[in-house]
Every structure is written in structure tokens, then in C-alpha cells.
Amino acid sequence: MFEFKILKRSKKSRARLGVITTPHGEIETPSFIPVATRGTVRTLESFEVEDAGAQALICNTYHLHLAPGEKVVKRAGGLHEFMQWRRPLMTDSGGFQVFSLGFGRDHGVGKILREESEKHIREGTQPTNIKITADGVRFRSHIDGTELFLGPKESIRIQETLGADIIFAFDECPSPLADEKYMRRSLDLTHRWADMCIKAHKTKQALYGIIQGGSFKQFRAESAKIIGAMPFQGFGIGGEFGYDKRSLRKMLGDVHDLLPEDKPRHVLGVGHPDDFPYIASAGGDTFDCIAPTHYARRGVVFTSKGRFDIRNRRYLTDQKPLDSRCLCDICATYSRAYICHLMRAHEMTGMKLASYHNLHFFNAEAQRLRTRIKNNEI
């Protein structure tokens, strides 16, 4: 069973409150979705992730296919049982790895450029370590170097075997360095693959289509219209969105206006706390990001007064909690001094405590976001 119900629409923006119902429970929207790449939110057990307020998780199809393999997961009873996670699960398609292991690795860039670049990816160009074809992508495993092919049919088959509640169509996530001609070809490929995914889909799992187009407004609009007209249960908005919050909000808003209103929208790979109001006010319902645990493992904690590096020596004598306004168990129990000591000593427990706090903070911010929409503040 999959259903999306809109409970309230904002009069100030495109924001809305809703509920996504899945076979493993409900997701109140807008919602932050933590990333569990290999079937785990790093350093945390599944029950801790739920205790920290997570409503759902998103796992990575490419990485789970490499290890332990979808057949191993299926024999364990499916991804929910394998992870001991009882709430909703999403799996991405592997399309992001087309970028991250391809042009992203070649040029050392992420989805958003930190500065202007003179490099441009032109039509007909191929990444160094992968090969993009009309039917899919040839990778080499980073584990043992073996070649593997991932296309629309393969991605859907893997995701159906893993058994998440929500799965995504396979796409080409383009680089922010792609020029207009390359983006044109890439977009056509994504739309072709979307149709192939629909035809390959055999289960009752909800299938989301992905809108691409980079920062080209005309391509984003075209993609939203084409993908929006296909029989998907929801939509993902992928790729890069420009260079600042204003362009992010405008791009998302333009896309959402062209999509069916009664279906959920997931913003892929964007979700720092200061992004939440922009995503919601533009019409986003769910969004994922690796930030809570990625930053925590490097000592960065998020608080109501901003983020800071707990590894800094000055915190060794600071007996305050990480955030005096935070209601998480970590802030109720441990001092900055203790967590600073653990991080400086490279103890795994320090990473665990910081990860739990950050995850709780992100989920609490999402709850505050829903409250603000309910109170007509956004």
C-alpha cells in the first residue's frame, strides 16, 4: 500500500504538510531522510536512528549490489529484516554513482561548484573510469575491480530484490560542468531510461521518476513535464541546482509547479538545516543528505547557534552540553569536554555521540519546519 495525502497547503508559499503511507508505516512531510548507504547510518544502530527521530532511510543500490549483494539481502528476509529497520525505506537507483564515480571523480567536483571553473564537459565526452551507453553504464567495482553493468532493467531488478518501500528510476546524474549540448543528450537518456524502468517494474513498491536538467531552466521544465506525465507514484529532483539558496529555491519551485500536485516530491542529496525552509517553501516533501553523520565523523556538530568543531582544544574544559537547547540523550548526558576528548583521541564513541546528536538535531529541525507550516509561518 502506498498513498500520499496532503493535509495542509500554505498560503504563503508552495509548502504543504502531508503524510506518505507505506507498508512499513507513515512519513510525516516535509521530512528529512537520513542516508544509510550500505544499509547503515554510520556509527549508529538501527534502533538509535529511530530514537533520534528518523522516519525513513534511503539506501544505495549500487553499493548494496557490490556488497553484500541483493541475493544475500533477500535470503535474510529483505532489506528491512537485514537492517532490523521497521520503518519505511527508500533505495536510490545508482544514478548518482554515474556522476560521482565518473565526471565527479575525474574533475574533483561535487553536485554544486564551490567556484567558477573553466572546464566544460561537451557532447560525446566520456568519463575516465566508467562508460555511459544507450542502455546503461559500465562500472568497475572499487572493491575488486570487476566490471559490472547497471542500466534501467538491472537497477529495478536489484531494487525489487532488496525490497524497499520506495524505489527510484535509473538516471544519469550530470555534472555541473556539463555544457548545454551534453545536457541535452543526458536528459534524453534519462527520459528513455525512465520509460524502460516503468516497463521493467513488476512489484507493488512505489516507483519514483527523476527530473534532471541541471541549472538549465528549459531542460528542467521539459523534464518535469515528461517525467510528470509518466505513471510514477512520486518524483525525485536530482542533479545540481545552481550556486546559491535563491537559485535552489527558484529551480525547485519551477519544477514543482509543473508536476502533479497529488504526488510526493523528493529532493535528492540536499538537506542542511538552513536548506529546509527553502526546500519546503518551494514544494519539496522529503529530502536526503549525508551531512549529519558525515560532518560528525569529522568533529563538526550542528546546534541552534550554528555549527562548530568539537575537536578544538578549547572545548576540553567546557562542561556544557553540545547544545543547551537540544533534547537529545547525548546533550542530557555528556559534556563538550568529554566528546572533545574522545574525538581528539580518535575514539569511535566520540563519532557515535556526535552522529546521534546531529541526526537528532536534523530531525528536530524538520519537526520545527512542519510546525511552522502548520502555524502559517512558511
Image (cartoon, rainbow, N blue to C red):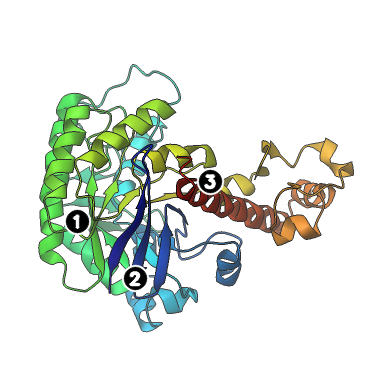
| Image spot of residue 100 (x, y percent) | 36, 42
Kindly identify the residue that appears in the image at 28 percent across and 51 percent down.
139
User: Disc 3 to disc 2, how far (Cα)?
Assistant: 25 Å
Identify the amino acid type marked 3: Ala
187 is higher (above) or lower (below) than 20: above
Q: Is any atom of residue 124 visible in this view?
A: no
User: Disc 2 to disc 1, how far (Cα)?
Assistant: 26 Å
Identify the amino acid type marked 1: Gly
| Image spot of residue 87 (x, y percent) | 45, 71
Q: Quadrant of residue 43?
A: bottom right
Mark 3 neighbour density, 10 Å: few (under 14) some (14–19) many (20 or more): many
| Image spot of residue 320 (x, y percent) | 83, 47
Kindly identify the residue that appears in the image at 32 percent across and 30 percent down.
250
Kindly identify the residue that appears in the image at 22 percent across and 35 percent down.
213
Which residue is tagged 3?
Answer: 291
Labels 1 & 3 near each other (Cβ < 8 A): no
Q: Quadrant of residue 219?
A: top left
Identify the amino acid type marked 2: Thr
**SS at mark 2?**
strand
Nearest to viewer (mark 1 / mark 3): 3
Tell whether 58 sits left or right of 340. left
Mark 2 neighbour density, 10 Å: few (under 14) some (14–19) many (20 or more): many
156 is higher (above) or lower (below) than 228: below
> Which of the labelled discs sits on residue 151, or is there none?
1
> Which of the labelled discs sits on residue 20, or is there none?
none
Which residue is tagged 2?
Answer: 22
Nearest to viewer (mark 2 / mark 1): 2
Q: Quadrant of residue 112?
A: top left
